[in-house]
Amino acid sequence: MDHFLYRDGLLHAEDVPLIEIAAEVGTPFYCYSTATLTRHYRLFEEALNGLDHLVCYSVKSLSNQAILRTLAGLGAGMDVVSGGEYRRALAAGVPGEKIVFSGVGKTHEEMAFALTHGIRQFNVESDSELHALSEVAAAMGKRAPVTLRVNPDVDAKTHEKIATGRKEDKFGVPIARARALYAEAARLPGLEVVGVDVHIGSQLTDLAPFEAAFGKIAELTRALRADGHAIRRLDLGGGLGIPYTSSNETPPLPLDYGAMIRRVLGDLDVEIEIEPGRLIAGNAGILVAQVIYLKQGEGRDFLILDAAMNDLIRPAMYGAHHDIVPVVEPCAGIERYPVDIVGPVCESGDTFAKQRLMPPLAAGDLVAFRSAGAYGAVMSSEYNTRPLIPEVLVHQDQYAVIRPRPSFDEIINRDRLPSWL
Ligand code: LLP
C-alpha cells in the first residue's frame, strides 16, 4: 500500500494534488511520500520485533538527505557502499556507530575516513580487503569492526544483473573459504571480528533463496564459534522484492520474512541486521512527467514524454516494468489503446514501455510512473545534457523541493577549457 491515490479525480501524494507540485516545480520530477516511507520502515521493525536488531536502510536505493533524515528519525541505521554515501549519512545526522560499510572496492581513504568518524562495521568482501583494512586501522592505532561477506552460492532467482550470491558473482568470499579467512582476520592486528554478512541479490520475490542462504549462515556461525570467534552479529543484507504491477504480483511480506529469520536464526543469540532499500523506498516514490507529443508511426503510436532514460534507467537497463498512470483519473470503463511510451533521448533504448494499454492522452497531460522511489533518482544522469530532475518530499498537506533542478549554466559551467583552446 502506498499514499499515491486518486482523490476527486486527481492523483495525490498524501494530501497534495500532483498537478499543484507540477505547476510550481515543472516536469519531470520525482515525488516521495513520507507516510509511505515511514510505513515501510515500520513493517521491518514489526517483523523483527523481539529480536535484537537494527534495520540499516540501504542508502544506494534513494539517498537524498531528507529521506535519510526521515528514516534516521525513526531509528534506522544505514548501509553505505561508498565514501560519498557514508558522508551523506553523516550529513543527514546518522551517527557513525549506526552505519555499516559494504562494497567490494573500498579504498584506503574511504576506510580511514570511516574509522575517523565512526563506523558500526565494515562488511569485508575479500582477502586483500581484509589485509588493507587491518593496515589502515593499525596505522591509526585502531581496530576496525568487521564481518566477512560470505558468498553462499545460492541463486536468488532474480534479474541476472542484480543477483549477487552465486559463486560466479563478484561478491563476497566463497563460503568454503570462510573459516580460513576468519582465522586470518583474527590474526590481523587492526581487526575485530564482530559477525557474518550475506546479501544474495535484489528484488527477490520468493523467501526460499533467503532461507537457503541464511541456513548456510547459521551453520557457518556455529562452526566459527566452535573455532573461537565471537560472532555476535549477523548482517542479512537486503533484497526483499516489491510489487511493480498493481495486478498479480504478491512478493513475500516483511512479516513472513521476519518469521523465517526467527525460524532459521532465532536460536543463535545474535543481533540481526538487515539492509533493505527497495522495499522501503520503491513504492514511496513516483516520477511525474508530461506528454510532449503524440506521434503516429507505422502501425504503432508513440507517446513522447519529457522524462527519459537518463531520469529513470530501469526499463532500459533491466527491461523493468513500471506502471504508468494518468495524473487526471480516467473515466471508469474508458477504452484503452496500445502505445509505445518513450522519452526524447536519441536512442531506441529510451523506451519506457512497448504497446502499453493507456487511456487517450493529449500533449500537456501528466502521467506518473509508479514504484520509482528506489533506484530511480539515484541512477539518473545528465545524458543529452538533460538536467537532473528535482526531487520533492510530501508530508501530509505540505511539500518541499529536496533537490532543485539545476540551471543549464550550472551544468555547462562545470566544464573547464584547457589553456590551449
Ligand atoms: N545491501 C547490499 C550489499 C546491496 O548490494 C543492496 C543492493 C542492498 C543491500 C539493498 O537491496 P534491496 O533491498 O534494495 O533489494 N539498480 C537495481 C538494484 C541494484 C541493487 C544493488 N544492491 C535495480 O534498479 O533494480
Image: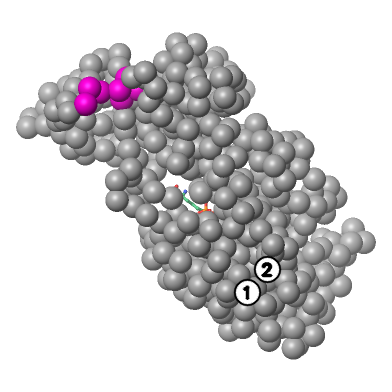
The CB of the residue at mark 1 lies under 8 Å from ligand 1: no
- The answer to which quarter of the image holds residue 235 is bottom right
Are circles 2 and 1 on residues that touch, CB within 8 Å? yes
Find residue 159 and name its label: none
From this viewpoint, which residue is outermost toward the left?
299
Residue that mark 1 sits on = 265
Work out whether residue 76 can be spotted. Answer: yes
Residue sitting nearer the eye, 329 or 18: 329
- Vertical placement of 147 versus 337: above or below? below
Which residue shows up at 38% across the image and 58% down it? 159
- The answer to which quarter of the image holds residue 163 is bottom left
Q: Quadrant of the C terminus?
A: top right
- The answer to which quarter of the image holds residue 355 is top left
Magenta stretch: helix, strand or loop mostly: loop
- Vertical placement of 89 versus 382: above or below? below
Which residue shows up at 36% across the image and 18% down it? 8
**Residue stretch rendered in magenta on the structure:** 326-332
Q: Is residue 286 magenta?
A: no
Indicate the position of residue 166 as horizontal and vertical percent values: 47, 71
Indicate the position of residue 398 as horizontal and vertical percent values: 59, 19
- Vertical placement of 251 versus 117: above or below? below
Q: Quadrant of the N terminus?
A: top left
Residue that mark 2 sits on = 234
Q: Secondary structure at mark 1?
A: helix
